Image (tube, rainbow, N blue to C red):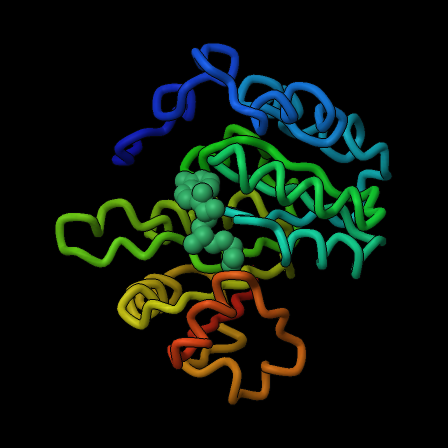
């Protein structure tokens, strides 16, 4: 039995169609970007079917996920840089959601889609073993003691993502919050994942050369804050 505060997205976020005053980003999700962007009612219809029905690719085609795309610099970069892989983004908020998919589509990427969805309910979007690599960059840190329960990385979430990923795939995790990083690494260590990389100063590490600096990463780095990074391989 799940101990999560919310397991059903519709219980936590309002339905797009019920918004009293849809702003321009809401209208774009339902209109101009509907071929690439899925609201919280459409997205789960493709659970287990993303390759076949959305991307129209073979059953063994790589399918990656970014959780919390923000304004989508990494999302668009990744889609463009790896056209041989498909990429789905999950984002709660309308503005960053549209910024992300618009950036990818304008860059000419045909392999990117985005869903307005709550990452806490990611298992409603994907079937067991449907995903390859998962990117989680700068999730909300929830640093106060009473907020810790809101942290996305917890034992149950790791177990859920493990069940959705194919063997040999990875989780790519970055955060500016050292406290959150230590919390996450503690949980990664007791999970079935192998920790392939672990650094508390990504930009001075051997992993810097392959790193793409996200929007939030740029903000924190400009303030002298070091970036924490872990790469986990699914057994
Ligand atoms: C701090 S930003 C990081 C954005 C981006 N990854 C980057 O590195 O620039 C976190 C993003 O995650 C989104 N987010 C927070 N909680 C989420 C959840 N439960 N499900 C999906 N997205 C979420 C927020 O709306 C926000 O855009």
Choose between 28 and 127: the one closer to the eye: 28
Q: Residue at x 33, y 62 (%)?
A: 187
Q: Is residue 69 left or right of residue 49?
A: left
* Relative to 181, 35 lies left or right: right
Q: Nearer the viewer, residue 206 or 97?
A: 97
Which image quadrant: the C terminus?
bottom right
Picture coordinates of residue 83, whole percent (x, y): 84, 53
Residue 41 image position (x, y, % from top left): 55, 17
- Quadrant of residue 43 within the rendered picture: top right
Q: Residue at x 53, y 87 (%)?
A: 205
The answer to whether residue 140 is left or right of residue 78 is left
Q: Residue furthest left?
A: 146
In the rendered image, is residue 235 in sight? no
Residue found at x 42% / y 48%: 159
Q: Position of residue 38 (x, y in %)?
A: 63, 26
Q: Is residue 58 visible?
A: yes
Is 48 situated above or below 73?
A: above
Q: Name the residue located 52 percent from the left edge and 12 percent from the top edge.
A: 17
Residue 186 shown left or right of residue 109 in the figure: left
């Amino acid at each position: 039995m799940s101990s999560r505060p919310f397991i059903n997205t519709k219980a936590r976020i309002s339905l797009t169609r019920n918004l009293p005053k849809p702003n321009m980003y809401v209208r774009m999700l339902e209109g101009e970007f509907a071929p690439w962007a899925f609201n919280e009612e459409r997205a789960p219809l493709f659970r287990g079917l993303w390759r076949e029905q959305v991307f129209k690719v073979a059953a063994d085609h790589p399918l990656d996920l970014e959780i919390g795309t923000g304004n989508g610099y990494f999302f668009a970069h990744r889609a463009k840089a790896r056209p041989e892989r498909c990429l789905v983004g999950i984002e709660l908020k309308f503005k960053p959601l549209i910024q992300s998919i618009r950036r990818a589509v304008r860059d000419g990427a045909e392999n990117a889609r985005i869903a307005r969805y709550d990452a806490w309910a990611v298992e409603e979007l994907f079937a067991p073993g449907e995903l390859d690599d998962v990117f989680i960059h700068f999730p909300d840190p929830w640093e106060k003691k009473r907020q810790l329960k809101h942290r996305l990385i917890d034992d149950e979430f790791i177990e859920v993502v493990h069940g959705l990923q194919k063997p040999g795939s990875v989780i790519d995790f970055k955060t500016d919050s050292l406290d959150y990083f230590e919390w996450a690494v503690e949980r990664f260590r007791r999970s079935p994942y192998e920790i392939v990389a672990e650094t508390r100063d990504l930009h001075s590490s051997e992993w810097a050369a392959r790193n793409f600096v996200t929007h939030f990463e740029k903000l924190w780095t400009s303030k002298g804050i070091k970036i924490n990074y872990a790469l986990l391989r699914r057994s």
